[in-house]
Amino acid sequence: MADRPGRPTSVPVRISERTWREEVERYALGSVLRRAAERERASLERRGIQRSVLRRCEAEGPDGTSLAGLVKAYVPLGDRPPSERPFGFVFVPGRSQDRLVLTFVAFGERHPRRGTRSVYQRAHKRLHGRYPDEG
């Protein structure tokens, strides 16, 4: 989502308490994952997210995920290389009062160890009601 002259550089983010609980608070208090997400939340709600850190999700992922139209941000947010940011947020873009707004839908590891669902698989389930490998 490249910046264009005259367009705001940040996008407002909506985070429902239920989704936050299900996506972030499933991790133990003090865990690396939970601390990473909690560190970013206040800024996301107060200032939104910089367009420059947003990336489009693959419409059809190699693991069967279908995330056309969604965007992601690597966590911790910033400009470090993606390899140094192992977690991710996934958002659904929408409009409010003729302005782009992102709704938080998933958080987790981008490329977890075998047997753990990725943030992209979790986002797929939120959108489609099932994980990609559940037929």
Image (spheres, rainbow, N blue to C red):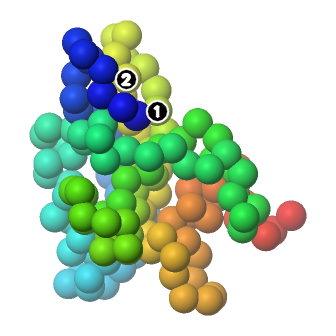
Mark 2 surroundings within 10 Å by alpha-carbon count, few (fewer than 14), some (14 through 19), many (20 or more): some
Percent coordinates x, y for residue 115 in the rendering? 63, 88
Q: Position of residue 41 (x, y in %)?
A: 21, 54
Vertical order, 36 against 102 (above or below)? below
Left or right of residue 37, residue 22 in this image: right
Dot placed on the residue nearer the N-terminal end, 2 or 1: 1
Q: Check the picture and name the quadrant holding the C terminus.
A: bottom right
> Element under label 2?
strand
Quadrant of the rendered image containing residue 86: bottom left
Read off the residue under disc 1. 93
> Residue 50 — which label?
none
According to the image, label 2 marks what residue? 100
Binning the other alpha carbons within 10 Å of mark 1 as few (below 14), some (14 to 19) or many (20 upward) gives: some
**Residue 91 in the image, given as x and y percentages of width and height:** 44, 45
Residue 6 located left or right of residue 42 = right
Q: Residue furthest bottom?
A: 114
Please report the residue visible at 31 percent of the width from the left and 47 percent of the height from the top: 53
When the figure is inspected, residue 110 is found, relative to residue 48, above or below; the finding is below
Instruction: State if disc 1 and disc 2 touch (CB < 8 Å).
Output: yes
Q: Nearer the viewer, residue 65 or 128?
A: 65
Q: CA distance from mark 2 to mark 1?
A: 7 Å
The answer to whether residue 24 is seen in the rendering is: no
Q: Residue at x 20, y 84 (%)?
A: 30
Q: Residue at x 49, y 39 (%)?
A: 92
Q: Quadrant of the N terminus?
A: top left
